[in-house]
Image: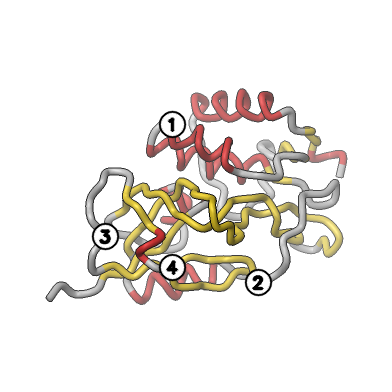
Amino acid sequence: MNEMRTFIIGYGSLMNVASRNLTGSTGDSFPMLLGGYRREWGVPVNALGKPTHGWTAMAVAESYQSRIAVVAMEVDESALIRFDVRERGYRRIAVPASQCERVDGKGIDAITFFMYVPEISVKPPTLTHPIALTYIDVIASGALQVSPQFAKNFFEECEGWTIVLDDRANPQYESAVKVSDEHRSYIDVQLKRLNVRMLQLSKI
């Protein structure tokens, strides 16, 4: 009998290898499709020392007929505790393997899946809590690490593309990592296609 392995499902910044390595080491990882959830911008996070301003983080919500592209990564017990701390404002839930399908078609036997979901009701981005561009950079670059199609799925699946704060000169997102110029260019094209409203950091 195979020993059960533990995997976290990443649908946002945890899809990016460098960003998740800021928190803890992970083992095997693979892209997969997660059924029963939709992805959206909807968790307001206050900036340090600014109780009325901040940015909006990624969320998932149950949606019976939806499927989203995610990355599953193996963790041990100590890493799981560190990710619990990182994902404050979210709670960890178990996800049935029946809702998970590996992109490569391989089996997912003997795996326990966990995912972080918001503790609060989802709220759309606002002028005081826009989407931080450095946060988008991390997520989209992580998706591009899988494949261009995976990244395309991320932009098309995600809901709530409205107001974006250009904070690249002074990152507001605490788990921001270096992103290549090539990836930034790709991201900028996608945001232009989505017709988001872009704010400058000095304006908020």
Q: Which residue is mark 4?
A: 95
Q: Earlier in the sequence, mark 4 or mark 2?
A: 4
N-terminal label among 4 and 3: 4
Label 1 or label 2, whichever comes before in sequence order:
2
Label placed on residue 119: 2
4 and 2 marks in contact (CB < 8 Å) = no
Q: Seen in the image, is 74 located left or right of residue 35? A: left
Q: Quadrant of the N terminus?
A: bottom left
Report the front residue among 60 and 89: 60
Secondary structure type for disc 1: helix
Q: Secondary structure at mark 4?
A: strand
Tell me the distance, in whole angstroms, between the alpha carbons under discs 4 and 2: 16 Å
At a point 53% along the width and 40% down the height, the residue shown is 154
Q: Is residue 105 above or below residue 118?
A: above
Q: What residue is disc 3 on?
A: 108
Q: Give the residue number, with chain letter if any, for mark 1.
A: 149
* Point 26% across, 46% down: residue: 105
Q: Amino acid at mark 1?
A: Gln
**Marked residue nearer the N-terminal end (2 or 3):** 3
Q: CA distance from mark 1 to mark 3?
A: 22 Å
Picture residue at 49% right of the left edge, 48% below the top: 68
Question: As shown in the figure, which amino acid type bears the numbered disc 4?
Answer: Val
Is there CB contact under 8 Å for labels 2 and 3? no
- Element marked by disc 3: loop
- Quadrant assignment for the C terminus: top right
Residue 16 horizontal side relative to residue 186, left or right: left
Viewer-proximal residue among 22 and 75: 75
Total count of labels: 4
Q: Say which of marks 2 and 3 sits in front.
A: 3
